[in-house]
Amino acid sequence: MHRRAAAFTLIELLVVIAIIAILMAILIPTLHRAREQGQRAACLSNLKQLTMAWILYADDNDNKIVHGCTGGPGEMPIPQDEDGWVHWAGYSDTTTDVDQIKAIEEGALFPFCKTAKLYQCPSGLRGEMRTYAIVDSMNGWPTKPELTIKNRMQITRGGERIVFVDEGWVTQASWSIPYDRESWWGSTIAQAGITAADNRHKDPPPVRHGGGTSFSFADGHSEYWKWRDQRTIDYGKLTPGANPLQPGNPDLHRVQQAVWGKLGYEPVPEGSS
C-alpha cells in the first residue's frame, strides 16, 4: 500500500518564511556591526603603523617632522627643501588607482612605510587609494603658523596631540580645523554629496566609522572617537543646510584641543547653540 508523501501546507510555508525574515532582521544589523568593528580595528592598526613611520622619519631627520601637505618640494605650501608625506595625484573620482598609488610611493614617508594598502582605510570607497591625512598643526598648511609644529621636540603630551585622521575623502592640503572659533573648516553646505563643487574644499568631521572616526597621536597610539553631537554628523555627511559654526559642540572642542593643544577662544557650554 502506497503512503502519501508529506508536504508543507501553505500556512506552514508562510510560518517558515516569517521566521526566516525575523532571523534575517536580527542577524543583518549584527553582521553589519561586526563588519564595521573589523574595519575599525584594521583602520586603527593602519594609523598606528603610519604614525610609527612618521616617528621614524623624525628620528632620521634630527627630529624634524615630515611636511603634512601633499606634493613635492616647492609645491605650495611645501618649501623647496622639504617633501610632502605623500604627493598629490588629484581627486580619487578623477584619478586612476595607478596614479594615486604612484603619488603615495613618491612621498617622503613611503621609505618608512612601504605598503600602499596601509594608506587606505578598509571602509574607503571604490577608487580611493588613500583616506588618511595629517592635521594642519603637524607641519601642515600654515593656518596658524605660530602653533605649527615642525620639530618633534616641540610636542608636549604626545599622547594628546593628533597627527593622522581617517579623513575619508581627502583634499590636497592637510586636514584643517580652526583654532580661534567654534567651527569646523568650511561653510554652510549648499549641495549634497562630497563630489559637488561646493563641497570639495571643505574638511568636515569624518563619519564613515559608525558616526565617528579614527585618529592617531604623536606618541604612536591610535583611537576611535564616536561623535556625540548630531550637528557633527550632519556636517560630516555634508547634509544641505548643515552649518560648520557649532557653539557648545563637545566633539568640536575635543578635536580642536587635540589638534592645536589648546582652544583659542572661550567655548560656549556644551549643549548651547
Image (tube, helix red, strand yellow):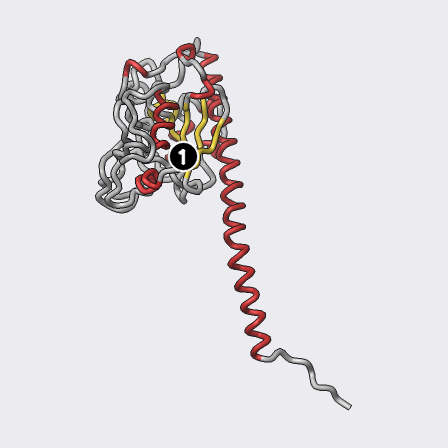
Q: Quadrant of the N terminus?
A: bottom right
Q: Position of residue 69 (x, y in %)?
A: 33, 24
Q: Residue at x 29, y 13 (%)?
A: 146
Q: Quadrant of residue 121?
A: top left
- Viewer-closest of 180 and 187: 180
Q: In the shown orientation, is residue 163 left or right of residue 184? A: right
- Viewer-closest of 138 and 241: 241
Q: Residue at x 45, y 20 (%)?
A: 218
Q: Position of residue 235 (x, y in %)?
A: 30, 40
Q: Which residue is mark 1?
A: 130
Q: Residue at x 22, y 40 (%)?
A: 198
Q: In the shown orientation, is residue 148 left or right of residue 28? A: left
Label 1 SS: loop
Q: Residue at x 33, y 23 (%)?
A: 136
- Viewer-closest of 19 and 267: 267
Q: In the shown orientation, is residue 177 left or right of residue 128? A: left
Query: What type is the residue that disc 1 sits on?
Result: Arg
Give above or below for 5 relative to 192.
below
CA neighbours of label 1 inside 10 A, class few (<14), some (14 to 19), many (20+): many
Give above or below for 47 relative to 169.
above
Q: Quadrant of the C terminus?
A: top left
Name of the residue lying farthest toward the bottom: 1
